[in-house]
Image: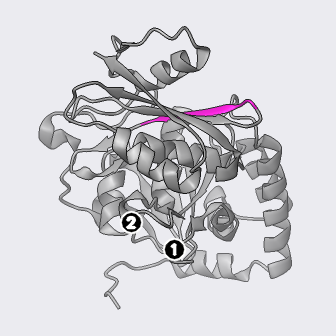
Amino acid sequence: MSINPFAADSAIAARVAAVEPEVRAQLAERVKAAIVSANHNPRENDGSVVPAALAAELIEEFGLTSVRDLMCLLLDTAKDIARPGISNFFVGAVGLETETGNLILGGNVEFPGTHLGFTLHGDGFVFTRAMSRGTNISVIAIGEAHPCAHCRQCLSEYGASDKLELIDPLGHTLTLAQLYPWPFDPAYLGEAGAVPGRELWPNLRLIEETGSPTAEALLAIGKRSHSPYSKCPGAVLLHLKDGNIVVAGAIESVAFNPTIHPVQAAMVDLLAHGYAYSDISGTTLGTLRGGAVDYSLSTRELMARVAPETPVLVLGWEI
């Protein structure tokens, strides 16, 4: 067992612990209903999101002290999004969007039959969703406010991470700087870090002229791919059997690993909107032809495990 050098606020821990199981169940039911109503509508991109208005309503109705207490109480609800098919160890995370006050719920995801490097951690899930939605996270709640070193490196990639706070039901309120006080961060290479909504590659263009609306959607996300280190933007679009699509781009790390591959980011959006892998009818990848990084093999590998009967189309682009 590691030694915890940080003091927790016992008053916060006592407030959270004092909430009765019946109240926790009612909170979970209300939040799940709100999430389900937003699911299967990727065009709105509201999957796994609790609107700020609902959060405020729940705080008042159930006599909670703050949105932070609510976030801690929703960690078990967030675990419902997790898909830990190897470890069966469920992790939930809840992030507070800076711009909206909405809450983003997420969980850890593992992919049986392929390597462990595809694993998504709960806090990584939340931040990947925020990037997809074009928002930042100011506070994240996790079971204990000491994410693994992989996640600390992942979180340090985001341009607003210097203001990030991590909280937990034990009463800890910590900054990322306290947990990772001398980081290898984007500034070391003169980069600003991941900034939601920023187009790093405005001149990106498809080599193959398809004329397809989905190809244009893929290209739009490719332009926002956070790939400043390899200079190889990537994006994945998942075609769904109901006619919808989800599309997401790469989020590179200054340390290279833990980079979020575009297919991983797409899986986050898929699960956030309540879809199963069996709902996928096809995959389209956009990747830089002849670049130092090519996402073709990794995309085909993961899709062969989660949706083995579906085709994978690779479209090349250039900068």
Q: Nearer the viewer, residue 225 or 6?
A: 225
Task: Give the farthest residue toward the bottom.
Answer: 1
The residue drawn where x is 46% and y is 78% is: 8
Amino acid at pointer 2: Leu
Residue where numbered disc 2 is placed: 116
The residue drawn where x is 80% and y is 49% is: 36
What is the CA distance from the residue labelled 2 to the residue labelled 1?
A: 9 Å
- Image height check: is 77 above or below 203? below
- Image height check: is 79 above or below 199? below
**In the rendered view of the protein, which quadrant contains the C terminus?**
top left
Relative to 160, is 52 on the left or the right? right
Please state the horizontal and vertical placement of residue 131, each as a whole percent of the image: 48, 38
Which quarter of the figure has residue 73?
bottom right
Q: Earlier in the sequence, mark 2 or mark 1?
A: 1
Mark 2, secondary structure of its residue: helix
Relative to 182, is 75 on the left or the right? right
The residue drawn where x is 19% and y is 34% is: 292
Residue where numbered disc 1 is placed: 86
